[in-house]
Amino acid sequence: MFVRKSLLLIVVLIPLLSACGQPASPPPPARSVSTQPAATNTSIPSPTRTPVPSLTFHPSPSLPPSPTPLPPETPPPTPLPTYTRLRGTVIVAQANCRYGPGYPYLYKYGLLEGNRLEIIGRNEAGTWIEVQAIGGSNPCWVKADLMKIQGDVMAVMPIAPEDVRLPMSPYYGPLTGVSATRQGDEVIVSWKPLVLRAGDDSEQFPYLIEAWVCEAGKIVFTPIGTYATAIKITDQPGCSTPSHARVYGVEKHGYTKWVAVPWPLANSSTPAASQTAP
């Protein structure tokens, strides 16, 4: 029993003794241990990109241009009449040249036989013409048959009675009390007298009536001079345009402002109120 224990002890000691006789092996090198914390990978992976299909733009088809609207058809303008100026020569010993186209208008100056003048206007009928010295600027009106006219007088520009310029009186106002009554085709126009100062008498008609009356279905302009304060004027029926008239007082310096005659309608005998020129 003792022998077994001894042998077992020997067996255990032999390797130990062998190990002691051999040189000791160097220790393995020490590993350096990093004191920094291990890096953590925090990068976010890139998202997967889905390729976008390329778009191809096709131009829209060109539309035909809208037709330009044509302007409304404009009627051709009415051609304006062409007038001319003529020349004429006085054929009587002396002709009275007046402020308006008619005997009732005030005398302006006289013309002598042989005077050569320029004809610049006429009344509608061509019976009175407006004349002036050639190159002059002081016209007056003379009876057409007192002159020898070179050319057709109707080729001269007509001048409406409303456009005839009369000299105005600086001293007297318009007539008053103007009224009118009708008896059939006769219209009686009346007014109060104009009292003039001494020396202001024109020695011509002291009253002038310009009347547009119906005659044979047409309105005719008729100037009338009178010494009385009432006058009878014929006015026929049958015109689409109404008749009318106006009245002036006259003195040597000129005319008062006209007053419109309250013209009565046919079959009327009631006087109406008058109207003074503006």
Image (spheres, rainbow, N blue to C red):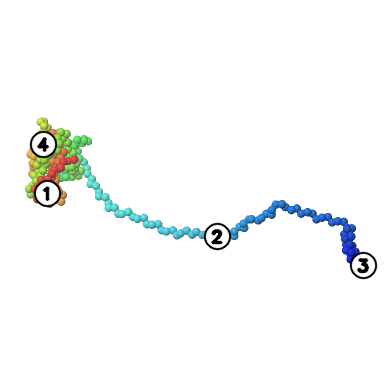
Mark 1 or 2, which is nearer the eye?
2
| Three-letter residue code for mark 3 | Val
Mark 1 → mark 2, Cα distance in angstroms: 96 Å
Residue 129 at what x, y percent from top left?
16, 41
| Three-letter residue code for mark 1 | Leu
Mark 3 → mark 2, Cα distance in angstroms: 93 Å
The furthest residue to the right: 3
On the rendered image, what quadrant is the C terminus found in? top left
The circle drawn on residue 3 is 3
The furthest residue to the bottom: 1
User: What residue sits 37% from the left and 57% below the top?
Assistant: 67
Helix, strand or loop status at disc 2: loop
Does the rendering let one see residue 269? Answer: yes
Closer to the camera in the image, 105 or 167:
167
- Chain-order first, disc 3 or disc 4: 3
Closer to the camera in the image, 63 or 56:
56
- Chain-order first, disc 3 or disc 1: 3
The circle drawn on residue 52 is 2
Mark 3 → mark 4, Cα distance in angstroms: 194 Å
- Chain-order first, disc 1 or disc 2: 2
Q: How many marks?
A: 4
User: What residue sits 55% from the left and 60% below the top?
Assistant: 52
Question: Which residue position holds label 4?
Answer: 194
| Three-letter residue code for mark 4 | Leu
Question: Which residue position holds label 1?
Answer: 265
Mark 4 → mark 1, Cα distance in angstroms: 27 Å
User: What residue sits 47% from the left and 58% below the top?
Assistant: 59
Mark 3 or 2, which is nearer the eye?
3
- Chain-order first, disc 4 or disc 1: 4
- Which image quarter: residue 119? top left
